[in-house]
Image: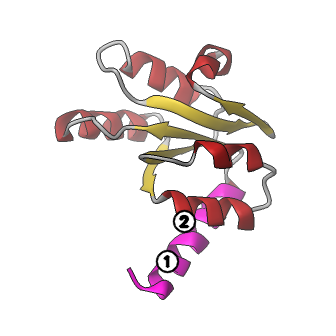
Amino acid sequence: MKKSEKNDIIGSLTEQINLSTHFYLTDIATLNAARTSNLRRLCDKQQVKLVVVKNTLLRLALEASNKEAKELYDVLSGNTSVMFCEDANVPAKLIKDFKKKNKLPILKGAYVQESVYIGEDQLDVLVT
């Protein structure tokens, strides 16, 4: 990927982060194509934007954003997808419901109402 393409992606991600009040970082790596499509459809219905990103580009976008989310840097390993949303608990509910039939997505972290949540164990807190 060319540097100009990377800069475009970083700029786009930074803009989305700045415009979003809430976003979730998840791992959907081992979902097959059909399940990934189902998850994307559910996200679309709930007005959640799901984006698969490179960790390095996401970190640079987080650094350039106006959000205080440095704690999320530690979860940027492996496969990472970002769920951008307007309603704070919609992605948490979506993840919890989807996990009833699937092992994924795994919640890596979330930025909700200017607070950072790390780890799958925070899912129940975020649902409420």
Within the image, what quadrant is residue 103 found in?
A: top left
Q: Which residues, given as a range, are shown in magenta?
A: 1-18
Q: Is residue 10 magenta?
A: yes
Q: Between 48 and 77, which is closer to the camera in this rendering? A: 77
Q: Does residue 44 appear to the left or right of 109 in the view shown?
A: left
Quick check: 55 above or below 86? below
Residue 121: % across, % down: 60, 17
Q: Is residue 74 magenta?
A: no
Within the image, what quadrant is residue 2 found in?
A: bottom left
**What amino acid is found at the position of numbered circle 2 in the picture?**
Leu
What colour scheme does the image use? secondary structure
Contact flag, marks 1 and 2 (Cβ < 8 Å)? yes
Q: Specify the quadrant that holds the N terminus.
A: bottom left
Marker disc for residue 57: 2
Marker disc for residue 6: 1
Residue at x 65%, y 22% (from the top left corner): 126
